[in-house]
Amino acid sequence: MAETLSGKTLFITGASRGIGLAIGLKAARDGANVAIAAKTAEPNPKLAGTIHSAAEEIEKAGGKALPLAVDVRDEAQVRDALEKTAATFGGLDIVVNNASAISLTNSQATDMKRFDLMHQINARGTYMVSKLAVPYLEKAANPHILMLSPPLDLQEKWFAPSTAYAMAKYGMSLVVLGLAGELRRQRIAVNALWPRTTIATAAIKNLLGGDAMMRASRTPDILADAAHMIFLKDSKSFTGNFLIDDTFLFENGVRDFDHYRVDPTVDLAPDFFVPDASPPPVSLKKLARA
């Protein structure tokens, strides 16, 4: 297989910031084309990044960018965005379902509007983007669909604190399970990637503990590096996998994980939904030399 993503075209939902943007930038450094499919077209004082600022970063990194204002709940918008991507770059090779809504609330604190939003974006949006991308991916040499969703580890402890969110995220993973089997004959790979630790994104800063939690996180680069490695795998054989970022990287020869730490002087915070049977390949404790 190819060793870079040069000339490949990626369609990434939620790519205006955070993990989606990091994946796009990693591909751009190879000379890839990146369609930035996200809702934020105008600056938001609470959230850094728009599809246009992301496009500028992609271009500066060496890629070609296509900023697209897309609500993944809207079928017409998704269809149009995929069509524009394929028309602009001559095809589509990789789809990344990164867009997600979160509310870590119990049943009594979760109103149905928020429940619906999480399911419409996370589960339904992932399903629809993947479904509508298949006719384009069938024409690609090494097509991949990647979900930023957890392994299917159905323990009560993951659901009890925030049932609605857990249902929505595991809904994305169920799409992986189903489509991996459905699309295997078309040699379209469908995989899931999930972080071992919290990742320094706006969601962590605004919803899960602020600066203290940010310091206990890894940077989005660890997921970008893992995703890049996934996309270079042979789509005919590497499919239906539920991958944890550091374990997957370790299994593929990576040994230095320290540079992913936001602050090496604090212990890393474990993410939720990571199965008990998946031990970390390296220590999450603060660095002794820090």
Image (cartoon, rainbow, N blue to C red):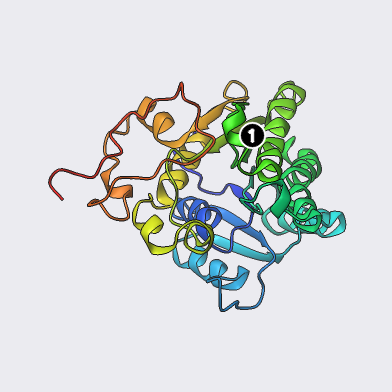
The residue shown at (12%, 46%) is 289
User: Residue 165: x and y, percent?
Assistant: 67, 45
User: Residue 159: x and y, percent?
Assistant: 64, 36
User: Residue 246: x and y, percent?
Assistant: 39, 35
Q: Secondary structure at mark 1?
A: loop
Q: Is residue 31 left or right of residue 104?
A: left
Disc 1 crowd, CA 10 A, few/some/many (<14, 14-19, 20+): some
Tell me the amino acid under the disc marked 1.
Ala
Q: Is residue 219 above or below residue 287?
A: below
The outermost residue toward the right is 76
Q: Is residue 8 above or below residue 203?
A: above
Viewer-closest of 255 and 100: 100
| Image quadrant in which you'd find residue 183 | top right
The residue tagged 1 is 141
The residue shown at (77%, 24%) is 182
Viewer-closest of 217 and 18: 217
